[in-house]
């Protein structure tokens, strides 16, 4: 059975974007991207909400002027399946992608049991739903050395989650990777 992993890049004060939606501070450098590629390699399916999908769909047709690590990420992303949960999107434009109108915890639970490769849930709103439903097995956070003050929180408010630290890594640029299992 696959693991459901929530992976996010966040500010030190816990936001994936600031109050205006800006996340330019979150772009990984080469060292961080190499690490990201390593942890993304086992992912067989990405679960996205509309906003995260609209951000990530860039990788479906990314140009050739990418660094070798960006090209590797592109290949990893394109090789994985994607499920987008949205009532406002009428269609999806990327390959290996299907559109679902609603996130149904029981359907996702059944899907997870049928998968051999791990599944990643992207975006704090969708991840929040998965966390509330008790579906998330791991949280992988890349904390950036910036405080943005307010914005889109990386973890849902009002939800207590017990976590156990599995791994940590510090990068030269000040980013810290924290890998936690969700205690169920």
Image (cartoon, rainbow, N blue to C red):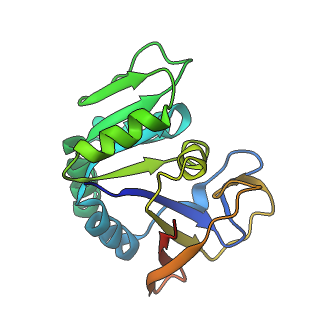
Give the residue at x 52% y 31%: 50
User: Residue 107 location in percent, x, y?
Assistant: 40, 33
* 118 on left or right of 14: left
Q: Residue furthest top?
A: 90
Q: Decide: is 95 above or below 134.
A: above
Q: How many marks?
A: 0
* 98 on left or right of 152: left
| Quadrant that contains the N terminus | bottom left
User: Residue 82 location in percent, x, y?
Assistant: 32, 36
* 65 on left or right of 156: left
Q: Residue furthest right?
A: 149
Give the residue at x 56% y 52%: 131
Q: Nearer the viewer, residue 151 or 66?
A: 151
Inspect this view and state whether residue 94 appears.
no
Q: Nearer the viewer, residue 91 or 66?
A: 91
Give the residue at x 46% y 12%: 90
Q: Nearer the viewer, residue 20 or 106?
A: 106
Q: Quarter of the image holding residue 79?
A: top left
Q: Decide: is 141 above or below 173.
A: above
Give the residue at x 41% y 58%: 5
Inspect this view and state whether residue 106 appears.
yes
User: Residue 24 location in percent, x, y?
Assistant: 59, 56
Q: Decide: is 106 above or below 143.
A: above
Q: Decide: is 3 above or below 95.
A: below
């Amino acid at each position: 059975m696959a693991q459901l992993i929530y992976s996010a890049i966040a500010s030190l004060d816990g936001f994936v974007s600031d109050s205006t939606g800006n996340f330019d501070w979150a772009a990984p450098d080469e060292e961080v991207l190499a690490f990201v590629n390593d942890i993304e390699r086992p992912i067989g399916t990405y679960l996205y909400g509309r906003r995260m999908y609209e951000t990530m769909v860039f990788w479906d047709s990314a140009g050739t002027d990418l660094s070798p690590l960006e090209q590797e990420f592109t290949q990893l992303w394109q090789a994985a399946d994607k499920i987008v949960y949205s009532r406002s999107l009428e269609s999806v434009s990327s390959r290996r992608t299907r559109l679902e109108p609603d996130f149904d915890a029981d359907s996702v639970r059944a899907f997870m049991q049928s998968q051999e490769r791990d599944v990643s849930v992207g975006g704090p709103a969708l991840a929040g739903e998965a966390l509330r439903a008790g579906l998330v097995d791991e949280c992988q956070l890349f904390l950036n050395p910036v405080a943005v003050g307010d914005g889109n929180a990386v973890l849902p408010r009002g939800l207590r989650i017990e976590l156990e630290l599995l791994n940590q890594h510090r990068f030269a640029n000040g980013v810290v990777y924290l890998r936690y299992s969700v205690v169920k």
